[in-house]
Image (tube, rainbow, N blue to C red):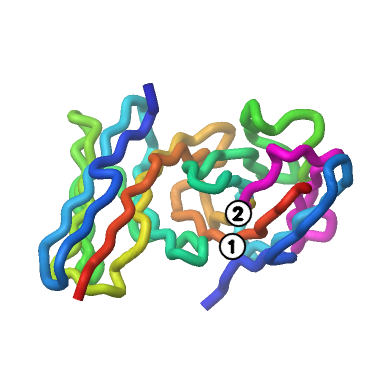
Amino acid sequence: KNEVEQSPQNLTAQEGEFITINCSYSVGISALHWLQQHPGGGIVSLFMLSSGKKKHGRLIATINIQEKHSSLHITASHPRDSAVYICAVGSIIQGAQKLVFGQGTRLTINP
Amino acid sequence: EPEVTQTPSHQVTQMGQEVILRCVPISNHLYFYWYRQILGQKVEFLVSFYNNEISEKSEIFDDQFSVERPDGSNFTLKIRSTKLEDSAMYFCASQGDRVSEQYFGPGTRLTVT
C-alpha cells in the first residue's frame, strides 16, 4: 500500500471551475506539502501545513490530522493552472525532513 | 528571489561511467536533499544531508551513490558506475531550517545509454 494516495489521478475541467484534489496518507507526519510540477519538470512548493488551512491567492490547502487527509482547492481555475499537483508528507529524521511523494494529479484546465 | 540551481540540465552518459550532478543550494540553508523521478513515475527520496553528513538515505542510495558538500556552496551527487535504470530526472532541494519548506532546483535529466 502506498503511504501517500492522491485522487483523482487525472482531472480535466473548464476555465472558471472550482477544483479539488485530495490526498490521504497512512504514516505519521511532521508536515504535509503541496507541490506543483510544470511540463518542463520543475517543482515549486505551494504549501506546507501541519494543521488547519492555508490560502495563497486562488489556492487553498486544508489538512485534517485525525483523518490523515488533505485537500488542495483552486478557485476560478485558469488554463495556466494546468500542471501536475503533488502531495508529499514530511517526517523529520535526524533533523532533516524526508519527503514521501504521492503519484501526482495531472490537472488540465481548458479555456 | 534566491533559487536553487543545478548543472548540467541534461547529461548523457554511457553505462558504467561515473557522473557528478551539481547543485548550488540557497545560501544560508542548512538542509540539503537529492530526489529522483524516473519518467512517468513519482518523485522518490534519495538522501538528506545536514551538518556535513548524511542524515538519512533510501534503499535506492546504495554504494554506487555518494554526496558531498566540498566547498560550502556546492552540493554534489556522484554515481560511480551508472546503470540503465539510473536514467531519471534528479532534483536537488534545500531547506532553511527543520520546519520550513523545501526549495527545489530545476533538475538534471540523466540519460544512461
Name the kind of residue labelled 1 in the image. Answer: Gly
Name the residue carrying label 1. Answer: B105
Q: Does the magenta stretch include residue A103?
A: no
Q: Position of residue A107 (x, y in %)?
A: 28, 58
Relative vertical location of residue A110 with respect to residue A87 in this rendering, above or below? below
Asked whether residue B84 is drawn in magenta, I would say yes
Q: What residue type is labelled 2?
A: Phe
Q: Which chain carries label 2?
A: B
The spot of residue A57 in percent (x, y) is 22, 72
- Image quarter hosting the C terminus of chain A: bottom left
Q: Between residue B6 and residue A98, name the one nearer to us.
A: B6
Left or right, residue A98 beside residue A22: right
Q: How busy is the neighbourhood of tag 1: few (under 14 within 10 Å), some, or many (20 plus)? A: many
Residue contact at pointers 2 and 1, CB within 8 angstroms = yes
**Range shown magenta:** B68-89
Query: In the image shown, does A103 or A48 lie closer to the viewer?
Result: A103
Q: Residue at x 45, y 53 (%)?
A: B100
Mark 2 vs mark 1: same chain?
yes
Q: Is residue A57 left or right of residue A92?
A: left
Tell me if A77 is positioned left or right of B37 in this view. Answer: left
- Give the vertical position of A4 relative to B100 (above or below): above
Q: Mark 2 points at which residue?
A: B91
SS at badge 1: loop
